[in-house]
Image (cartoon, grey):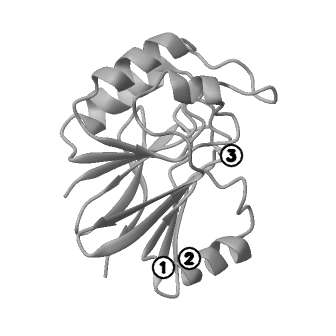
Amino acid sequence: MKIGIISDTHGSEDCWAMAFDKYFSKMDLIFHAGDVLYHGPRNRMTDGYRPSKLVEALEQCQVPIIAARGNCDSEVDASVLSIPLASPYAFAFVNGKRILITHGHFTETQEEKSEMAARFKVDIFISGHTHVSMLKRIGGTIFLNPGSPSLSKREDGRSTVALMDENGISVCDLYTGEILDSLSME
């Protein structure tokens, strides 16, 4: 199964469209780790900030989306989307792997993430929130932050998304397609 992973779109329909057209249109499933529509009071307005257009794109998306609610996602945001956006945590079981998706604002430290991963016996822990991509294995768990396609806070400023299949996970530059980091599932 092929899965596209994104977080922190913050209402940027342009970034969603690019991620979907370049990477996600052929996926079996998409995980969104929150902060879907609103840019939040601490962030600048994103390029392509058209939350109503992003709603239309998400509603028309033929690939199923599983999303966790982020700290910038409100009840109003959830009310205009048919994808569930009420819970800060989503769980999935894919290819024999237990996957937890959360925005990350309730589990900001690696210690908190590791404790939650151990409690729920997850193989893959996906979070966003920091806008900085990260991919690492600690013990038996893979920790992934796909970064942000719209408001990257990486030192190099690169906008990122992640791709997962039965072989592994890759973090890709949204614009160039360059693989910036990867891990095998083994």
Q: Where is residue 113 drawn, in percent x and y?
A: 64, 71
Q: Is residue 170 visible?
A: yes
In the picture, measured across the screen, residue 68 lies left or right of residue 167, that is right
Amino acid identity at mark 3: Glu
Kind of element beneath mark 1 = strand
Q: Which residue position is annotated with label 1? A: 141
Kind of element beneath mark 3 = loop
Q: Marks 3 and 2: in contact by CB < 8 Å?
A: no
Amino acid identity at mark 2: Ala
In the picture, measured across the screen, residue 138 lies left or right of residue 185, that is right
Location of the C terminus (image quadrant): bottom left
| Earlier sequence position, callout 3 versus callout 1 | 1
- For discs 3 and 1, the disc positioned in front in the rendered view: 1
Q: Residue at x 29, y 38 (%)?
A: 23
Q: Is disc 3 surrounded by few (<14), some (14 to 19) or many (20+) residues within 10 Å?
A: few
Q: Which residue position is annotated with label 2? A: 117
Q: What number is the disc on residue 155?
A: 3
In the picture, measured across the screen, residue 86 lies left or right of residue 108, that is left
Q: Is disc 2 surrounded by few (<14), some (14 to 19) or many (20+) residues within 10 Å?
A: many
- Camera-side residue of 9 and 107: 107
- For discs 1 and 2, the disc positioned in front in the rendered view: 2
Q: Is residue 37 visible?
A: no
| Earlier sequence position, callout 1 versus callout 2 | 2
In the image, residue 126 above or below residue 22: below
Q: Marks 2 and 1: in contact by CB < 8 Å?
A: yes
- Camera-side residue of 178 and 11: 11
Residue at far bottom of view:
139
In the image, residue 114 above or below residue 130: below
Kind of element beneath mark 2 = helix
